[in-house]
Image (tube, rainbow, N blue to C red):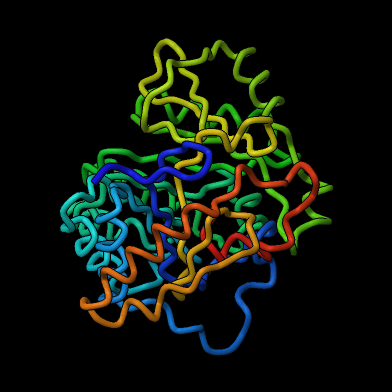
Amino acid sequence: MGTLQDAFGRHIHYLRLSVTDRCNFRCVYCLPQGCAKGPESAPLSLEEIERLARGFARLGFWKVRLTGGEPTTRPDIAEITRSISDIPGIRRVGLTTNGYRLAGIASALCGAGLTSLNVSLDSLDPERFARLTGCSRLESIVAGVEAALAAGIPSVKVNVVLLQDLCDRELDQFLAWTRHLPLGIRFIELMQTGENGAFFRQHHLSAEWMRRMLQSRGWGRLAREESDGPAKYYGRSGHVGKVGLIAPYTAGFCETCNRVRVSSTGNLRLCLFGGEEIPLRHLLQSHTQEDDLVRLIESSIEAKPASHRLQQGHCEATTNLASIGG
């Protein structure tokens, strides 16, 4: 069948699926104290994930991105990737990771059918990186990015959260990375959540500042491509890579939204910052429930809101990005 449309005529074909709510980093804008202690809420099993993805594929969803938490903390992440990439109708399978384990598993992920990889890397300065993430393994993560390119993963991007203390020298280091490597470096505005309000007010840096920095360095807007998502891309002569800006506080940001999210415990979220969740897990226990699953997803899409309300400060429904996968 064709892709679903919501009440605003947007074609919804992209599933962002969290496979765990646990993360081994302590990023200052997300989980500065680390994950809550105690047993993890049981994440969806490999079998439940496959049934879920099959249901979405029947509705015309052709793109799936695995998120967390940190998805590579699951030892079966390659098996999850393979199970989804084998589903008829699924054309792209992506993964967003902090890169901690990437160097050792990049080849396995590529062999399992991974088509897109996003690595969250907010600094190339070892001291600043450690301060932002609580991790001192910057070299290993850079090696993971290089391993992903060497393994042949078709699309490799680096996600950088814009923060006030980003200096010109470090910005130029990121831009230099695109000179000889086919990387997409995406600078993303810090988003306020229910837990990071004070940090947001102190450290938020507008994407408009970044746009001016790019223009002053000779970068120009590129023609939009279908795979760009919410990013606006820039290129420069002599660079094989490109640079993207993601500005969720810009008017009209949600007009082309094409995605929904499912939490690691199987709850459907129609908007990253929406409060309502629709439980799906009870329909993932047997393949005989697939028709009921498809009907529930299809009817739920009609309630997808026109946009988030971040500009009005409505962010409490998402306590932190690790809870739903950003």
Closer to the camera, 32 or 92?
92
Marks counted in the figure total: 0
User: Residue 37: x, y in percent?
Assistant: 61, 85
Whole-percent x, y for residue 236 in the image: 46, 14
In the image, what residue occupies the spot 26% across and 61% down?
A: 81
Q: Quadrant of the C terminus?
A: bottom right
Q: Closer to the camera, 128 or 155?
A: 155
State the residue in front, 321 or 155.
321
From the viewer's perspective, tell me whether residue 106 is left or right of residue 249.
left
Q: Is residue 133 left or right of residue 99?
A: right
Q: Residue at x 68, y 65 (%)?
A: 319
Above or below residue 224? Residue 275 is below
Query: Looking at the rendering, which quadrant does residue 130 occupy?
Result: bottom right
Q: Nearer the viewer, residue 238 or 76?
A: 76
The image position of residue 71, as x and y in percent, is: 41, 65
Which residue is at 32% across, 56% downward?
103
